[in-house]
Structure formats: structure tokens, C-alpha cells
Image (spheres, helix red, strand yellow):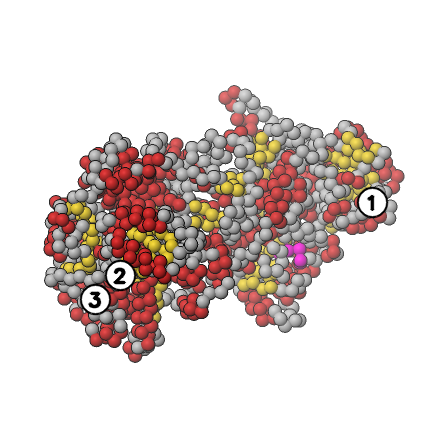
Amino acid sequence: MTFSPEFEQRFTEMLTHYPSKRSVLVPTLLYAQDEVGYLSDEAITEIAQRLQLTELDVRNVISYYSMLTTKPRGKYNVQVCTNIACILRGADDLWEHCQKKFGLRHKQTTPDGQFSIEEVECIGACSWAPAMQVNYDFHENLTKDKFDTILDGYKKKA
Amino acid sequence: MPDVNITVDGKKVTAPAGTLLIEACKTVGIEVPAFCYYPGLSLQGACRMCLVKVEKMPKLQTACTTVISEGMAVTTDHEEIHQARKSMVELLLGNHPLDCPVCDAGGECELQDMTFSYGASESKYTEAKNHKEEQQWSPVVFFDRPRCILCYRCVRVCDEAMDVAALGIQNRGSGSVIAPNMGDHLDCEECGMCIDICPVGALTSGAYRYKTRPWEMNHVATACTHCGDGCKTTLGVRRSETGMEIVRGDNRDKSGPNGDFLCVKGRYAFDFANRTDRLTQPLVRRNGKLVPVTWDEALTYVGQKLAEIRSQSGGASMGVIGSNRTTNEENYLLQKFARVVLQTNNIDHQRTADFAAFAAALAGRPDATASAREVFDAPAILLIGNDPTEQHPLLAYQIRNNVRLHKARLYVVNSESVKLRRQATLFSQIPSGSEAAFAAFLAGGDVANGANRDEWNALRDQLRKETGLVIAFGSELRGASIASLNKFALSVQGAKLICLADYANSRGAADMGVYPDLLPGYVPLIQGSKFKAEWGTLPDAAGLTLPGMVDAAKSCKLKALLVVGANPVFRMKLDPATFANSFLVVQDLFLSETAAVADVVLPAASAYEKSGTFTNTYGDVQLVKQAGEITGTKSDFEIIVRIAERMGYDVAKLVPFGSGSRADMGQSRGAQSGEADRHAVWLEAQGLELKMNPFDPTAVFDEIQRLVPGYQVSRLNLMAGNDQHTRLDQNGGGAVGDPALIQPANDGLFSSGSTGRYSKTLNTVMENRNRVEMPKVAAD
Amino acid sequence: MADLVSHPDEIKVVSKRFGQGAADIDRYLALDGYKAAQKALPMTPDAIINEVKTSGLRGRGGAGFPTGMKWSFVPKDSPKQKYILCNGDESEPGTCKDRLILEHDPHSVIEGVMIAGLAVNAESGYIYIRGEYRYLSIIMQKAIKDAYARGFLGKNIFGSGKKFDVYWHGGAGAYEVGEESALMESLEGKRGIPRIKPPFPAVVGLWGSPTVINNVETLASAPHIILDGAQKFADYGTPKNGGVRLFCLSGHVNKPGVYELPLGYSLKKMIYEVGGGIPGGKKIKAVVPGGSSTPVLTADEIDIAMDFDGVAKAGSMLGSGGVVVIDESTCMVRFAQYIMKFYQHESCGWCIPCREGTDWLKKTLDRFHAGGGVKKDINNIQYLAENMMGRTFCPLGDAAAMPTISIVTKFRKEFEDHLEGRPCPYDPVGSVRLLPVLSH
């Protein structure tokens, strides 16, 4: 399978950073996921071969990290933090609001494949709680209204 | 390593520096419990069962990861420790299904034992247990996830000990699960080590599951009947309608050269013995058809016929084909029968390695062969030809783990990119058929073709620097090449050799003189005065080889042929009509291709149903113990004796029974009832037990020990179930024959051997492998 | 991205370049950037280590191990390659300070890594940033590239003839990877399972080589110590608790944010003055002093000095600097439940007590808060947590057990108030939402 030139460039460069090939695995998986949308069987086979690992080994690693997924998900993954600092500032209401808004449950995707929602643990935005990430973008000091405005922005992009 | 002194529960313990606390405790009889710790596998510290108190340490420490240090004071028995272990068991039982009454592991379960020891009887949880359906990963591997306690033994044994790495750990936290390499099934060597090592019933065997309760079995320690490696195996045996059924194969006491190890055949392919199409009644050809007759009829007929042919056409018109899977005693008896009863040297077997040339090459160096155990400790190993992973799984296991645990250097020279190259310090891939050239090169020759020149030179230089090198070679090397290799071995300090042959007792057949030109111990016929002194006159001229007998049969010169535990029609791809003009008698377990064209077929007992000894390809002799009997069969030993008797021969001359001492066997009941058994063991070990009937193999073993050079091993050790390395003790003997006589079978792990083809489990595994596309893994 | 705050009591050391555009290398240089590294270059490794020891700097990741001592553990005679590993896997709930350093002052981290490298004769360093912080990875990658371009990194750093490389590395979501040996496993491309210790990373670390591993803030402190003098840094704080540190105020405070305050600063003052008090003038019920792993303090336990020893005296830990304030309206059972939800999610699953213990605690707390609790559950929660304490493979088990034990002992009455199917008396809305838990 083919990845983007940027991926290839980064991959090639990263290999020079470590004394062992395998060390590039975790960031490589995340970048591959960013391109494909998830870690497809094809992507796993490709990465395993490049790093001379078994596919089992790669899957063992993938299944360990919470950001990595072997199942397709929405173009925009809405990750609402429900850890303590966020909960104290209303994250459970926000998460409920999020579920209702999309009509989805944890880790489900809209039928059009645009949005997935996910309840996540601490994302390091405790002092700006409640917070969420849409893909890698942080959105903080949220209220339901602010949440709606932000999501509307993504909907327009979708 | 200098010694370190510690105290454990007030006891003084001295152990070498670097010893793990858990092992040091064992030396003074203090058992520290553990699920994840397993000797020889990497450390985990995961189960937290081995927590102990170490003085000056604030927290409890894991004994499995703590290395002892001078003055360490350890407590293993304390309320805090007991509570810690109890809570671990409680946590495990929280999700563990309590289906012990039907679980295969019930009665042999480490979690049950720990629960018994630490008394986690109170159920603390209200929530339902996590349930997952059982999965089948291969015909022989089943996985019951809720039972799994995540000790990771299976993952490690597969990866570290087997170098297969077919099992992984997926997800994390309470979702962690053992996963097979192909998503929902396994692509592996099907060795079953994962099942054997599982402390609970999470991994169970397709061949054994739900068949019995462990305490309903008799456990019989014997030798495996498949390849030439001679793994010790414990058979779990139950009574059945046919007499007995073998339900399980493992290596319970781990006392054999194989330790934990068994391969797919050793673990599962014993089931050929259980087949319902085993021959259980003698068959005699009448009007062109084989019909069942009584043993008495069949034996009388065979005896009369053979006696008649012997008096009419002479011994030279008769032939005997011996077996690679009958016992040493049977092989010895068979060649003695041929020579003294039939009066012929026309005796041979399917030779899968050139042991005769090996014996000739090593003449005068009786201790130049390496045992299976030595392979695990050798500082360096050279492997020429063969693919041990497929053909000698124990050898591969020993090499692999020697490299892993002892950092041995492995040199592999092979025409294929065999799997052991992964452990090799140096791997030289050579053109197929150039193994002999390589041996000649090692002996001091030069390389004609330049391709491998530098590599070979470097390799030879490096090998010469080794001490204690073990050289194992496959049947690619025969005749003069073995002599070359031996010449090279002489130039390496302490080098020892291993000649690799295919079947369970190929080495035994060779050692016992199932040759037309060699007596037991590779003694040439003309040097056989020692044997003549005991046996009387013997035919002097060398007899016909196996192909020679086939040719004689074709030209109607072979009037009679006795085939014991062999199948030449199948193996040599013969026209079934080849033996149409010979009186053909076949002793076998099944109606094989050869048996089907015989005049008389005699149902033989398998190696699980008789006693005696096997010698593996390394020359280690081991006890074969009878696990039970199948009604209607007789051991080849008994059949041969009975044929001799029907031919009018004095069987006391054939089998020196009745010798040994007379002894008071003691009481067999009451308070002293064990006395008789203990007494019998001692007598047996001294070679003094009563051999009260002519079917007692130990009577022949006495003769073997007396007459066959190299077999003067400790009888006591042998009887106690330990493998004993024989010496290849022959001065100027052996023979370098026609290399074409060597016909290896080259069976792999899954291809059928002589008996493996009758194993239902092995066939199921093979069919499954053929059905499922097996992609190459990236790491291979 | 994240809003910056300030308070007059702050002593800005690590945060002094925040909001000044110091991610740009020229701006960083204008703000005394890379002077410390150049000052350290001619110093002997021992001299650097002594400076750090004098500064009293203790690990800012949570455990508070003296940094200078950690550096001194690296065997000097080892022929192996040595590595510096910067732990930017900030994931401790309540903690969001490394994020600001990496965003506003990435070069100070690079410089800190270099100084650590000079202290132990390492030639390369890795900066591991958690996967969620993608934007910080981009900032860091650019900073590294710029530093190479200027010759600050590479084969001949600052023309000294010495070699030093710094690389960025990214995670992919795992709290456990914040544990130092699990971080090394992750960097080596494996599952983030901690390693058996000993050997410690200083002797056997990345790829079997001696490795110094420090938190982002710890390493970012090093340039200031070298440049401004160790004693000056030490004097900011209290004896044995040198310096200032970033405190992340969150939860029920009017002015949450990341404040750099001297060690030993009063917790009460921090909440009421720096943090502007509790919204709505409510009372405090409890305070998490140093990230979710630390035992909670009750309202009458907060009159303490925020340094390692001061918090320890109160029976908790200074931890990672995450101060989470909980007001009187909060249900502590629910709080315990959310803490356990986190640890259950993040347990690596390697050892029995953590894997099974967090799972059972979560299940029990879920049911309990939803009104399905029975009396023996309260003792059982405590029993489970106490039996995890000190017995797990790595500190995650303790991290899950400690807050739980503190909540169940200090707020036992709140547990009792939930008994016998009563809906949560503190949060009727929330408990109704959770009731479906009972149905399966």
C-alpha cells in the first residue's frame, strides 16, 4: 500500500533516529492512522513488513494504545474528557449533550462517516476544564453552547 | 560464581551469586508460590504470588525477581504475606469461572492448589463474572478466556523456548487477553507447549479435553515412538474396551532429556495405538484372501513353512527385514533369530542414516558422540544438513535454548534457509548436494568453486578455535564424508558428533546388528567369535541388503521373507507383486501395504504396549514401558520367540531366561506390601530378577549388556527411568557401504512417519494446515 | 492555545518566557536562551551534577526524586552509549503544566536535555510527547530543527567539538507510559509495560544503555539553575525542597490556571488568593494536592506548606503539582468512581492486583453510586484498595489505591448515605443518569 510523500519522508527520517528499527513503531502507527483513518489490515501488514515484525506483534502494540484503532471512525473524532477536573466543571452534562446531539454512544460513528464520539480520559486541559479534542485540536472552557458552535464549524467543513 | 549466604525463615541458605531468591528458597525446601515465574523463561513479576518479606525493605518483594545478596534475611511465612497471596487468589477467582468439576485442569490446577493453600473462600463481588465464549485456535488448541489468569507462560514458551511467537497479549488492563497470531486461529508448530505450561485450564488440548479426569489415568513414563530424538513422555492411560486407551501425552516429571518439551507428534500422535482398525487377529491367506485364524494356527503354519523352506532351500533363500521402531531387545532377538534359527545373514532394515560408517569413522573413540542433553550445554554447535526444527524437534529445542540461555555459538550449514539460522552465529547456505564437499573441505581440502570460499574459510577458522564443539549432521553425509568430518572433529578440542537418523529406534536397529554384514555393536561377521561362542555356528558370508532381498524376490530366489515392523512396499514404492513368489510373513499394527500382500499377518503390539529399551539417534538408551495391552496383539518379541519354538528351536538358547537369582519376593499384602516392589526394583537393577519366561526382554537385555560393546550402562539408572548414553565402542569395526543404501524418510513435523500416518490427531492438524492458507510471517 | 494566568505571588522561572513567543529560536536567544548550555559546555560532568544537587531540584513528574542524585547514578565508566529521555507523557489527571512549557518554551526543554547530556556524557536525547499533544510535537520538531540549523545540536555543538543529538518521539495514548520504564518500552516500539527493577534506568535503560529520564519541567529547570546559579534556585523554596514549581489549579476555583509558585507556598492561600476562592462562595469539601494519584485532603487539612515534606506530613503527596479543588456540593463517592474509572482504563493489565483490583473497584463504585450498594461494599472497597497497596508491579496500583483509601476513610459517611438503594443524596440528577447500570 502507499502512504503520502510526507509520511514516507518522516518514516525514513525517523528510522535514522534510533538504534533499533522497531522504535519508530508507535509514532508511525499514529501517522498511518491519520492518513488512512484507522489501522487497516493492509496498513498493519505494510508496517509489520517494513519493520520486520510479525503482524501479531504490531497488533499487540496497537491494542495497547488508546488512540490507535483498527476500526474505521469518523473524519472528526470528538473526544470529550470526563476525568476529574473536567467532571467537576460539568463534563458529564457535556458528554451527555454530545451523545444526544449526535445520537451516538461512546466510540460510535455517524452513518455518513463524518463524526465519531468518544469519552476520553485526562487530555491535559485540567485548568481549562471542561475540554475536548476534535482530532488533535483542543477546545477548552466549554459550555454546551460553545460546544455546539464548535461542532457546527466542523459540520460546515465536513 | 562465588557463593552468597542468606537466611530464609531462619534457615541458612548458600547459593551462587546471581541466584534468584525463589530458587534459593527451593534449595532448602521452602516453596514460594508463583504463577508467572517459570524456570528458563524470562521474568515477569506479574502474578505477585511470590511476595516475601526482605529485611530492610519497606514493601513485600517478589522472590522471582530478587537476586540474593550477602546477608539478606527473608521471611516467607508471615500473616502479611499470607494475606497478600490470599488477596491475589481472591482477585483471580473474581472472574475465574468455577467450572472446576468439568475443567480439564481440575485436579491438576495451580489456581486450585493456591486457593487450597491460601483459603480464598469468601466471595467478595456482587457483579457477574466476565464471560467469553471458548475459542478453537487449531485442531488441538482451545482457549477459554475467562479461565485465563494472564501469567504469560504460554506467550513466553512459544516465543522464547520455541521461537514461534504465535501468541501475543492484546488490549490492556482488565481487557488484556492472550491472542493467536492469525486473528482467530493459530499458525504454529502445534507443539502444545502452551497447553502443557498453562497453570489453569485456559488452554486445553483438542485431543484430551473433556475425555477424563486426571486422577482416572495411570501415568506411564516411556519414550516417544516417533522421530529419532527419544523424548521422554508420560502417557495418561485408561482402561477401555480394547484393553487400554492412551488419552494424553506429556512429560509430567520433566526428567527426560527433553525437559518440558514435546512436539506435535510426541504430544498427540500416540493415538495411532488407539485406532479401532488395529490388527487384533492373525490373518492367513487362503484361496487368495486373508482370513482370520487363531494365534496357534497362524504360528504353527509360519513355523512349519519356515522350517520347510529352510530344510529345502537353505537359510540363504530366506530373508528378514527389521524395524526402526521395535525395541533394542526385539532387534537383537530378530537378528539372532535370523542368524541362528533361519541360518541366514539376509537381514537388513531401512537405513535412514549411515551408522555403520559412523561407527567405522569413530573407531577407537568411543566417547566421541554427544548425548541429547549435551546439546543443551555445549559451548558451540555445528549443524550440517538436516532441518532439526522439522525432523529433530528436540535437537532444535536444545540448540535454540542453549543459544538463548547459555549464549552458545551455532554454526549452520544447509542448502535450505532452515529456521535455526535465526539462532546461528553464522549461517552458510550451500548448494544442495554439496554437503559432502563441505565435509571434505573441513577435513583440510580446498574449495573448488569460489562462491563460498571466503565464507567457508572463515567458518573453518572459527570452528577450529572452538572447544567442546558438538557437530550434528544429517543423512546428507554418508560413508567417506563421515570419515572426513571425523577427521576435522579430531582437530577441534573436545569435539563430539551426532549422526541424525529418522525413527525412534533407528540407532537401536543399527546398534543391534540388523545388518547383513555386521553383528551387534557393528562387529564384522568375521570378528564374531564372541557371538559364536554363545550362539554356536553362524553363516559366514555377508547376507543380502534390503534392495538385494527385493531383487532376489523379483528373481524368485527369495523363498521366504519375514517383515517385522516395516513396510517396504510403501517405503520403496515396490510393485505389490514383488513378493508373489516368496512366503511373506508380516508383523505389524495395521494392514499396511506390505501386510496386504502377505501370506501371514501377525498383529503386533505397539511400543506403548510392550517393554524394552530404545536408543535414540544420539546413542542415549531409555526404558520403554508398557502402558497397557490391546487384546489380541502380541509383542514382536513374543512372536519371534513363538515362531522359533514352532520351528523346533530350543527357545532357551534364543532367550536366556530362567537365569537370575531366586529370591524371597516378600509379602504382597499387609503392612509390608511395598517390600516386594522395592525388592523387585533392586533385583531388576542388578540384573538379578527372575526371568521366568522366554518372553522377558530383560533376559535379552542381559545378553546385550554382556555382548554388545558400548551398552554397559548403569542398569540402576536405566531402570529408574533415566536416559543413559551408550558408547560407540567399536575398534576397527563398522563398514562403509554403498551410500545408496541410506534412504532417509525426511518426514517433517506434520508429514506422516511410519506410525504417524495412522494418527487421527496428526492427520486432522495436517488437513487443517492444508486447508488454511499459511502466509509467511514477516519476521521469518 | 491554553490561556495564561498570573498572580503577584508567582516567581516566574520556568514560566518566565511564557507568552513571549520563545518557541521562535531568535526570540528564545534574545531571552537568554542557550546561554546555560554554553555555560555548561566547559564544566565537568561532576560540576554540573553538583550544581543541580545544590539547587535542591527534585523530580517534577510526581515522585520527587532528587534530580542531581539521579544523574549521579549513571555509571561513569560504562562503555555503552548513554541517553537522556525527557518524559513529556503528561497524563496525571489534574496536571497540565508540561503542556505549557512545551508550547511556550520548547527550547528550554532541549537545552535542559543538553545539560543533562553533558552531566552524564550522553550524546543523544529523546523528548517523548504524549500522542494527544500533536500540536506540541509540531512545535517541538520545529524547535529541534531550528537548533540543528544554528549548530546548537549535531556533531559540533556551539563549535565545541562535542556531539549531541535531540530527537522527538510521540506516544499514542497510555497513562502507564508515564512510568519511566514503561516509557522506555514505548519508545522502543513495544507495549507500555513497565520493566522489572532493578536494574534501574540509570544503569540499564533505553536499548540496554544507561539512561537519565526526567520530567519536562525538571529538565526545563536545569538551564535556569546553571545560568542563574544553583543557590538562587534553592533559595526560592524551602530547605530540601529547592526552587519553584508549576502548580495546576483546577476544579472548583474561580481562577484556575497554571501558576509558578515557590515550594512551601500555603495550599490554603493558593486556593483562596491565587485561585480566587471557590465559585459561589461555597465551602471546600476536599482537595487533591498533587494529581489524582495522591490521597485527598479534607477542608481542615489544607493549611499546609506545598512542598514535598509538607504535604507528606499531611498524609498525602506533592505529586505532579495538579491541585484539584472540590467544593461542598460534590459527591465523594462519585469522585472516587471517576478516579477509579480512570485507573481501570489505564491499568496496563500486567499484574493481578492492579488489573483485577481496579476493575472490581470500578464495578463496585459504579453500582454503589447508582444506589445499588450494600454495607459490606464499603469495607470491601477499602479491603480491595488496601490489598493493592504496595503489591503491584509498578506505582499505578498505589496511585489507584491511595485516593480510594483516603476517600473511603475520610468520607465514609457519604458512602453510608448511599446505602440501601437510595439515590445519591448529593447529586440526584447524576445518580438517575447512572441508574441503568443496575439493569445489567
Q: Quadrant of residue B739?
A: bottom right
Q: Which residue is mark 1?
A: B577
Q: Is residue A31 above or below residue B618?
A: below
Crowdedness of circle 3 by 10 Å Cα count: few (<14), some, many (20+)? some
Q: Is residue B369 above or below residue C14?
A: above
Residue at the location (35% across, 44% down)?
Answer: C355
Which span of residues is magenta-colored? B473-477
Q: Nearer the viewer, residue C285 or B77?
A: C285
Identify the chain of the residue marked 3, using the numbered disc in the image.
Answer: C
> In the rendering, which numbered label is found on residue C99?
2
Disc 1 residue type? Ala
Disc 3 residue type? Phe
- Left-right relation of B519 to A105: right
> In the rendering, which numbered label is found on residue C18?
3
Residue at the location (30% across, 58% down)?
Answer: A150
Indicate the secondary structure of the residue bearing disc 2: helix
Disc 2 residue type? Arg
